[in-house]
Amino acid sequence: MGKRLTIGEFSRITHLSIRALRRYHEQDLLVPAEVDPASGYRYYSLEQVRPALTIRRFRELDVPLADLRTFLRADSSATDVEQHQILTAHLRRLEDRLGRTQRAVEALRELLDPAVERTVTLETLPAQRVLAVTLDVRPGADLTWYDAAMRDLDTAVVNRPVLPPGGRYAHDLFTEGHGRATVYLPTDAKPPSATPNVRELDLPERRAAVATHTGSHDDLDLTYGAVGSYAAHHNLQAQDLVEELYLVGPRDTDQPPRWRTLVAWLVD
């Protein structure tokens, strides 16, 4: 063993508090090179300075303890597959979180600026024949129900050309967290027997307060607020449904800033 450092000396070198070093020991992240069995004093080696600072950075990035332990126990080689997978997965989570934070900041700036308003118009949506999947979304469900519905619709239309997909959603789906949803594809194709969940549906001509949402769906509530406010301001009686038309979406591009979603607040 090389030079032996007391916990105080090691704390000064690493700028990690003694309390933090004790916590790292208790969490089995950084075990002292030696612990005196009589006094319980902790001693560290110079070789532990770099791992200690690495652990600090990982904890600042909120790497889960289980992942961090796995990383530290894995081979230190830069080509180690397990380490690479842990780092890649966590960096992806951090990038997603950063993206959500940036979008939240942008939304707040818009909300705090009274001069910024989203453009809303009153329009009549044309009648359409579509293939549709209708289902009751249960409380606490994630969006896998939408993905499953779109897979059934894609199977039904095969390679026939279709217009952008859409959805009709009960307001309860947003206010209560569950409700009726209909996902559709505008097309003249007939549903094959292999897709029993898919049916033909004739959408009537309908009036709506309409706005086109640009970008990620994280701030879609701002567009909903705009169309709902427009309808209320103009004393338009809201129907039980709202409609979304995915003009450009994840099916078309993996770049959220390019997404375009038509939001239609259906009114009588």
Image: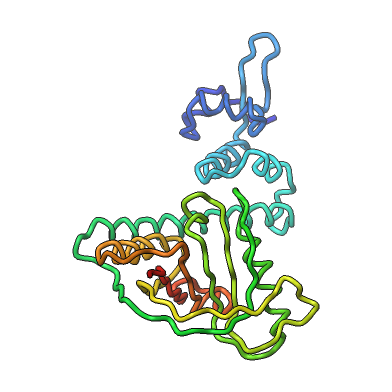
The residue located at (62%, 65%) in the rendering is 146
The residue located at (35%, 79%) in the rendering is 123
Work out whether residue 5 or residue 74 is closer to the camera in this orientation and state it.
74
- Count the numbered circles shown: 0
- Name the image quarter holding the C terminus: bottom left
Q: x and y percent of residue 112 in the render? A: 24, 56
183 with respect to 210 (left or right): right
The residue located at (66%, 29%) in the rendering is 31
**What colour scheme does the image use?**
rainbow
Tell me where residue 148 sits by quadrant: bottom right
Q: Is residue 252 above or below residue 114?
A: below
- Name the image quarter holding the N terminus: top right
Q: x and y percent of residue 118 in the render? A: 29, 69
Work out whether residue 197 or residue 79 is closer to the camera in this orientation and state it.
197
Tell me where residue 181 sits by quadrant: bottom right
Work out whether residue 55 or residue 176 is closer to the camera in this orientation and state it.
176
Q: x and y percent of residue 50 in the render? A: 58, 41
> Looking at this rendering, what residue extends furthest in the top direction?
38
